Image: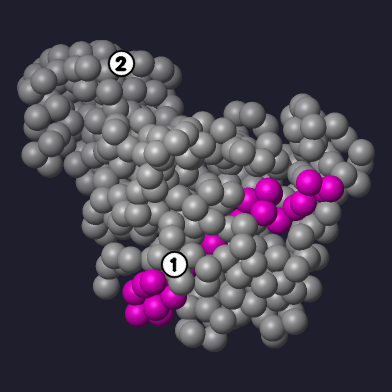
Amino acid sequence: MSIESLSQLTDPACAPRVVFKVGSALLVGQDGEPRREWLAALVAEIAAARARGQQVIVVSSGAIALGARKLGLARGGRGSLSDAQAAAAVGQIALAGFWAELLAGHGLIAAQVLLTLEDLEDRRRYLNVTATLGTLLAAGAVPVINENDTVATEEIRFGDNDRLAARVGQAASANAVVLLSDIDGLYDRDPRLEGAVRVPVVREVTSEIHAMATAGSSSGLGSGGMTSKLQAAEIAGLAGIALAIIDGRPVAPLAAALAEERGTLFCPPGKARARKAWLGGRLRMKGAVAVDVGAAAALARGSSLLAAGVTRVEGTFSRGDAIAVLGPDNAVLARGLSEYDAAECAALMGRPSPEHEALLGYAPRSALIHRDQLVML
């Protein structure tokens, strides 16, 4: 059953498994202390969801903000990568403690899970995460997830928990992701401008929708803005997951948003196969191939990518790596797993299939990227 309205987020028939993302600005006050009353009310809403029969995963920011205050670090612990890592090491203990204590008050067990980008980009590790989350939920626990900021470097960071929440939703086969934000949804322009109008439902994240986004977080504590939320909506949509942005500032924010039907709901276009959802949600590609007009049209019809339609090879990648497929206008058309390494792709580029065996010195594969290993964007 598809989710077409915010009210369905609390319906176990429509959303039996939900991911709630909580940002730093909501969980931690300007004084660097946790907002206990607000957090307690949110946990009560999570407990109510569990009582309705819904499974809940929490993606929680706040470790860096909490740790920065304890260590006396400037700029909320975000002055440098080493400051953020140190703050996270201290703050994550406190953050996990808050969640465990408050959930226990409702008879619920908290399970801490710390992830890096690589945990969800690597297929084997992704499947391990999927299995772990499934086991925890089946056992009745509430997984509380955060980026592992203590070990993540700039090269292996999500950078914001909006996209992490969407990727966790994919891994957990969730039905909905709810982003609790310091704004009540997507507006058609900067919401600080006169005449700005909130968009209640988005059917497709188009270039026009992206143009509405503003890049910054209003609080200065978080790392995500509306742009990251739209990227999260795209990731969720590729997996057939609905995503909602609601105002997290009121006490009991879910009840407040549903009472007024206030937020923005991104409806997914359909349910994707698990492997293709993983491919579509990947944030890093190892390389790229550009294709001509004919190849682009064939891909749109559901065909595999043949080397004859490739016009350019970029990057250094190996067989099995995820690469982007660029159209004639250099826009990303698709992502897929390459059947060849970069050097072999370059050798086969633009050449018809009957010539491939002589060029490679061995029997060629059926395609450069097979359609079962490719997802259109």
**Where on the picture, by quarter, is residue 225?**
top right
Task: Give the number of the disc on residue 260.
Answer: 1
Nearer to us in this view, 263 or 127: 263
What distance separates the C-alpha of mark 2 from that of mark 1? 51 Å
Task: Give the number of the disc on residue 182.
Answer: none
Residue flagged by tag 1: what amino acid is it? Glu
Determine which residue is flagged by label 2. 313
Residue lying furthest front: 194
**Where on the picture, by quarter, is residue 44?**
bottom right
Between marks 2 and 1 in the image, the one whose residue lies nearer the viewer: 1
- Magenta segment range? 7-32
**How far across and how far down the image is residue 135, in percent?**
55, 73
Q: In which quarter of the image is the N terminus?
A: bottom left
**By what rule are the colours in the image chosen?**
one colour
Q: What element carries label 1?
A: helix
Q: How crowded is mark 2: few (under 14 residues within 10 Å), some or many (20 or more)?
A: many
Q: Residue at x 80, y 36 (%)?
A: 77
**Where on the picture, by quarter, is residue 64?**
top right
Inspect the magenta stretch and tell me whether residue 295 lies in it: no
Q: CB under 8 Å between callouts 2 and 1? A: no
Q: How crowded is mark 1: few (under 14 residues within 10 Å), some or many (20 or more)?
A: few
Q: Which residue is drawn at 62% across and 57% down?
A: 249
184 relative to 306, above or below: below
Left or right: residue 51 versus residue 65 is left
Q: Residue at x 39, y 23 (%)?
A: 287
Nearer to us in this view, 199 or 153: 199
Left or right: residue 344 versus residue 118 is left
Let me know if residue 259 appears in the view. yes
Let me know if residue 100 appears in the view. no
